Image (spheres, grey):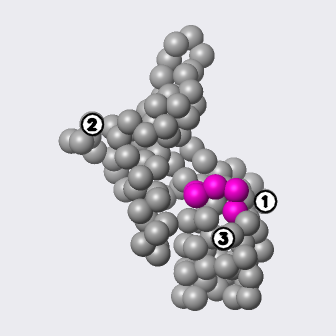
């Protein structure tokens, strides 16, 4: 990630930033007063090519969208089929420093079930 974007992301996600105090808190207000410990963002991706990726970054609506476009473009050099992706999902968790979170990947369980059926 280019340094200016990394610095902007680090600044945006610093403790007590508006992300955590405004957006994250409001997102995690559940029904009946329950609280979740995560926020999920689904970022739409434009059709990215070698010739338009800089323009896509400039026209992005948010820092998360800019980062998703940069990552998509960088990965496409090694994994060209990633250019067919239409969105990127970003999760944030607010946990104590010693809390663990198992590394995992998500899959399309509905699609897998349909493939088994037919």
Asked if disc 3 and disc 1 are in contact, CB closer than 8 Å, the reply is: no
- The disc placed on residue 44 is none
Report which residue position mark 1 lands on: 118
Q: Looking at the image, can residue 13 be seen?
A: yes
- Residue 17 vs 5, above or below: the answer is above
At mark 2, the secondary structure is loop
Seen at 24% across and 42% down, the residue is 97
Magenta-tinted stretch: 60-64
Where residue 66 appears, x then y in whole percent? 61, 65
Seen at 64% across and 55% down, the residue is 62
The stretch drawn in magenta includes residue 63: yes
At mark 3, the secondary structure is helix
Where residue 106 appears, x then y in whole percent? 54, 55
Q: Which is nearer the N-term, disc 2 or disc 3?
A: 3
- The disc placed on residue 57 is 3
**10 Å neighbourhood of mark 1: few (<14), some, or many (≥20)?**
few
- Residue 82 vs 108, above or below: the answer is below
Q: Which is nearer the N-term, disc 2 or disc 1?
A: 2
Compute the Cα span from label 2 to label 3: 33 Å
In the figure, residue 27 lies in which quadrant?
A: top right
**10 Å neighbourhood of mark 3: few (<14), some, or many (≥20)?**
some
Q: Nearer the viewer, mark 2 or mark 3?
A: 3
The stretch drawn in magenta includes residue 108: no
Where residue 75 appears, x then y in whole percent? 55, 80
Q: Who is closer to the viewer here, 105 or 19?
A: 19
At mark 1, the secondary structure is loop
Report which residue position mark 2 lands on: 96
Seen at 78% across and 59% down, the residue is 118
């Amino acid at each position: 990630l280019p340094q200016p974007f990394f610095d902007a992301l680090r600044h945006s996600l610093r403790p007590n930033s508006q992300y955590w105090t405004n957006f994250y808190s409001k997102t995690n207000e559940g029904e009946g007063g329950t609280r979740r410990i995560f926020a999920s963002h689904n970022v739409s991706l434009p059709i990215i090519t070698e010739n338009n990726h800089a323009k896509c970054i400039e026209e992005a609506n948010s820092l998360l969208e800019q980062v998703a476009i940069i990552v998509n473009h960088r990965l496409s050099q090694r994994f060209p089929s990633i250019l067919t992706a239409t969105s990127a999902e970003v999760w944030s968790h607010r946990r104590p420093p010693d809390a663990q979170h198992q590394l995992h990947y998500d899959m399309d369980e509905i699609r897998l079930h349909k493939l088994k059926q037919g």
